[in-house]
Amino acid sequence: MSESSRLGSVNQRARNRRDQGIDRRLREKVREAKARGFTYEKHRVPPVMVRGGVIGAPLPVRKSGKSRPKRRFDVTLNIPGAEMRLPSLPQVSIDMRLFSGVLVAALGFLLYQLWNSPSFRVEGLNIVGLQRLNSRDVNAILDVEGESIFAIDPKALEKKAREAFPEFASVKVDVGLPRDVQVTVEERLPILTWHQEGRTVLVDANGMAFPQRDEGGSVPAVVVEASSSPPVLRIGDSFEANTTQFMPVEMVSGILSMSAQAPKDTPLVYDAKHGLGWKDTRGWDVYFGDVRDIDVKLRIYNVMLKQFKKDKVQPVLVSLEYVHAPYYRLER
């Protein structure tokens, strides 16, 4: 027997004696444990799955980040049991704050382009319903030419038009894309002309007054020469027409009734003290106060005229304001 074989045999016997000693000590401990009432179960050692590997080699750790696992798509083919795998696509994550910022910037740029685009610039107003006024006057006052259609405020334009043109009974502004602005108006219909302190206004059936813009234009046949303002309007110490009610509706009706009783082509007169009347062609002013009992007042006036002719009297003022107390004045 060679020396190496002899040493191997000796080592093997030594290991066997060591293992036998270990087994003997384990058996003694098991007997002692059983004697004390403990049970013993032999633990099974899990089978070894890998041999020859490096013990304690660290496992690779995936770094955390914004990358997401890729999606895999498998497509079934017509051949039974066969599938085709498409290239994997990464899952992309979008930052919502960044997306919102880009969206706001894009919308802002779009609004800026629309606001400054010539295609949305107003070229002029389309005005419907004008009778006595012309479109040039209205366009000059409202002054929207060249404005962006998005800057047009219909309510503000309506208010501006009513303030500038009291002859408008109603104003409606409609705005449409790309640059259409239509103004629909209804003009007041004048039924009498009021002269006072060198100024002239026209009055409609509701007692609303507005200026006579065209001096050469037609005016109502009923004309009142007034020495004072109507009862409902007094602005400071001056006479002005505005969009408020100029005179009561009852006064408008009285003026029309008085005009029907006055001689043809005779202007009516108004005085705050004596009321309504007219300028008699014989050279005096006759006042009737209001139109109450106008028939009785006219009969009394005719009687007074006959008396003036008989007595050759030339009055400067005749008053029939009070039916039971008519009078005349010879001097101013």
Image: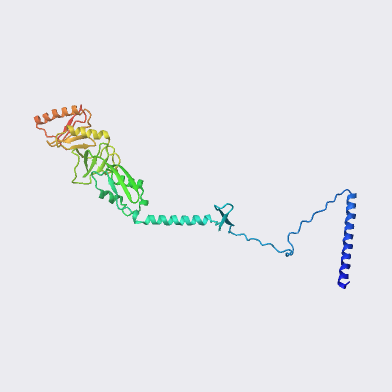
> Is residue 34 visible to the viewer in this orientation of the structure?
yes
| Residue 181 in picture, x, y percent from top left | 32, 48
Nearer to me, 161 or 192: 161
> Is residue 90 visible to the viewer in this orientation of the structure?
no
Up/down of 146 relative to 218, above or below: below
| Residue 39 in picture, x, y percent from top left | 85, 49
**Residue extending furthest front?**
79
| Residue 286 in picture, x, y percent from top left | 17, 34
Up/down of 55 relative to 202, above or below: below
Which residue is located at x 27 percent, y 48 percent? 138
Nearer to me, 52 or 127: 52
Nearer to me, 88 or 287: 88
- Which of the 4 image quarters holds residue 281? top left
Up/down of 203 relative to 323, above or below: below
Which residue is located at x 46 percent, y 57 percent? 105
Which residue is located at x 50 percent, y 56 percent? 99
Residue 128 lies left or right of residue 37; in this view the side is: left
**Residue extending furthest bottom?**
3
Which residue is located at x 87 percent, y 65 percent? 12
- Which of the 4 image quarters holds residue 331? top left
On the rendered image, what quadrant is the C terminus found in?
A: top left
Residue 205 lies left or right of residue 29; in this view the side is: left
- Which of the 4 image quarters holds residue 21? bottom right
On the rendered image, what quadrant is the N terminus found in?
A: bottom right
| Residue 215 in picture, x, y percent from top left | 19, 46
